[in-house]
Image (tube, rainbow, N blue to C red):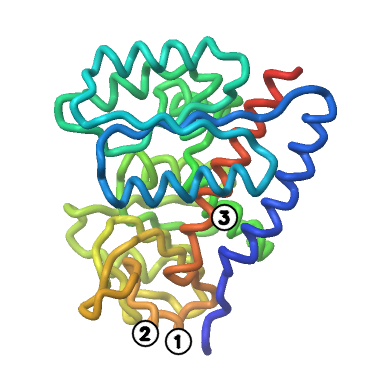
Amino acid sequence: MTAQLIDGNALSRTLRTEVAARAAALKARGVTPGLAVVLVGENPASQVYVRNKIKACEDNGLHSVLEKYPAELSEAELLTRIDALNDDPAIHGILVQLPLPKHIDAQKVIEAISPEKDVDGFHVASAGALMTGAPGFWPCTPYGCMKMLESIGYDLRGKHAVVIGRSNIVGKPMALMLLAKNATVTICHSATPDLGAMTRQADVIVAAVGKRNVLTADMVKPGAVVIDVGMNRNDEGKLCGDVDFDGVREVAGFITPVPGGVGPMTITMLLVNTLEAAERSAH
């Protein structure tokens, strides 16, 4: 059995078409969804991510503002700028690109963003909303993973889902989203003594640790759905995920590729969150 691919590029195109239509409807009412992206420093990867986010906004009818600052920017200056963006009615979403320079407390910066504009879903209010099932913004990467499961018509009720990784950005919110859909969820991490014993029981596996080949074919139950959130480089310098793709695809029922899987979905869900922020503001 060779697994069916869950194509993140194709799903992203479909969702972005919907975003563009909803953005056009808002514009007809005099509201243009606006995203402010704040970049501090010259991190090359961050510059690429930011450029892709800005282009995605422009391509789909959203207004975007890029604010670039030198790495020497003080924490106080950054917090002052975020306050101004919180008060700007033309800005519906605020994204501060991580990582920030070491002298800036990233958590303090995230908490300074208004929860109504926290389109990254990292604010403690967003985390609390996810935990309790209240309206809020879901972090974009796990939100994208849920959309991928939805796209294949997968019913999570009663299924065993294993999340490998416990980060605040992916692992923990992913587990909560799966739980909300009535899956039985196990979270595994670096202190899990026998990862394979857990994953071999799983109907759904989400690998999100940033470590090559953390999941191999012998660790996967035949027919399982495997979602690879990892972004690594192999020995030849090519992009790869956390999953041994060639091996696992011969066992799994569905699998996401890297690149072209979860990656494009993350930016797409950022657009969705920004659009929803604008719609809530308009109402």
Q: Position of residue 8 (x, y in %)?
A: 56, 63
Quick one: which residue is furthest to the bottom in this view? 1
Q: Tell me where residue 122 sits by quadrant.
A: top left
Q: Position of residue 198 (x, y in %)?
A: 32, 63
| Residue 184 appears in the rendering | yes
Q: Residues within 10 Å of mark 2 (few under 14, many from 20)?
A: some
Residue 250: give its label.
1
Mark sitting earlier along the chain (3/2): 3
Callout 3 touching callout 1 (CB < 8 Å): no
Which residue in the structure is indicated by mark 2? Answer: 247
Decide which of 3, 33 is in the foreground and name it.
Answer: 33
- Residue type (three-letter) at the residue carrying disc 2: Gly
Q: How crowded is mark 1: few (under 14 residues within 10 Å), some or many (20 or more)?
A: some
Local SS, label 2: helix
Residue 60: give its label.
none
Which residue in the structure is indicated by mark 3? Answer: 158
* Badge nearest the viewer, 3 or 2: 2
User: Residue drawn at (39%, 84%), measured in percent from left and top?
Assistant: 246
Q: Is residue 40 above or below residue 54?
A: above
